[in-house]
Amino acid sequence: MDTDRLAETKISKKGKVIDAWYAGKTHDFGGNVQAVMRPDGLPIWVSQVEPGSAHDLTVARQHALGALYAAAARGLPTLADPGYDGAGIGVHTPVKQPADGRALDVDTRTYNMLLRSLRCLGERGLALLTQRWRALQHVTASPSRIGDFVNAALVLTHFEHRYLGGFNRSSQHLDFGGVRWAGTRSWSGCRRGCGGSGRRTGRCGRRCGRRVGLSPRALCSGSSGG
């Protein structure tokens, strides 16, 4: 997520002083936000922001991979870009070109082509957030607030697309392909103004919502850094 130039610095792994919010990937200042999308490209979860200098895989390990491993154990793999190479079991990435210049064999090239052709649909999710909502295109507020802005955009995007997955308003939980209410089942809300958590709240005083099922297909992950 693009931001203004920032003065905050940190020490790199090589022992050098660097700009904490400068992303070498995009050569610009910004924050690193991870996202998980459905196979059709609708974003279903976003992480809190980390400084743009943080590597995608480092941020994914901190915020998302634990839940993605649990999803993979239940038969729901994740498709990711080459930046997540080595993420672990259940996270599928393209095979990189050998450093010695050797060509990949035909089976590996076919695997890469199929993976990218499926994952490209998931890339739509980042565009739905960053291009639809102008506030995310360049953040002038404190970069520590970027995560709040992106989560607000996620809720609005779900509302626009009538996706009523269970969103935990107090703290997010990535639970096998979606966000759910902590400690409860996932429910969708009622049009009559109920809370949507399955409890008897709101004007109608009824238990409202239906159980949100799990997609049998793969998830897609991505990031927006800088």
Image: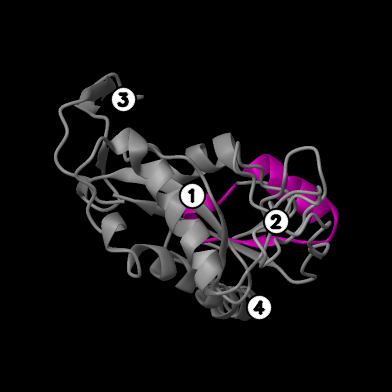
* Dot label at residue 49: none
Colour pattern of the rendering: one colour
Report x, y in % for residue 114.
61, 79
Horizontal side, residue 112 vs residue 89: left or right: left
Mark 2 or mark 3: whose residue is earlier in sequence: 3
Q: Secondary structure at mark 4?
A: helix
- Secondary element at tag 2: loop
Give the amino acid type for the residue marked by disc 4 in the picture.
Asp
Image point (17%, 33%), residue name = 6
Is residue 83 highlighted in magenta?
Answer: yes
The residue labelled by disc 3 is 12
Which circle, 1 or 4, is nearer the viewer? Answer: 1
Whether residues under marks 3 and 1 lie with C-beta atoms below 8 angstroms apart, the answer is no
Asked if disc 2 and disc 4 are in contact, CB closer than 8 Å, the reply is no
| Image quarter of residue 210 | bottom right
Q: Nearer the viewer, mark 2 or mark 3?
A: 2
On the image, numbered disc 2 is attached to which residue?
203
Vertical relation: 17 (above or below) 84: above
Foreground residue among 65 and 145: 145
Say if 92 sits above or below 181 in the image: below
Mark 4 closeness class: few <14, some 14–19, many ≥20 residues within 10 Å:
few
**Mark linked to residue 34:** 1
Determine the secondary structure under disc 1. strand
Q: Is residue 82 magenta?
A: yes
Q: Is residue 72 left or right of residue 94?
A: right
Mark 2 or mark 1: which comes first in sequence?
1
Give the Cα separation between the discs numbered 4 and 3: 39 Å
Q: Residue at x 27, y 22 (%)?
A: 10
Residue receiving disc 4: 107
Of mark 2 and mark 4, the one earlier in the sequence is: 4
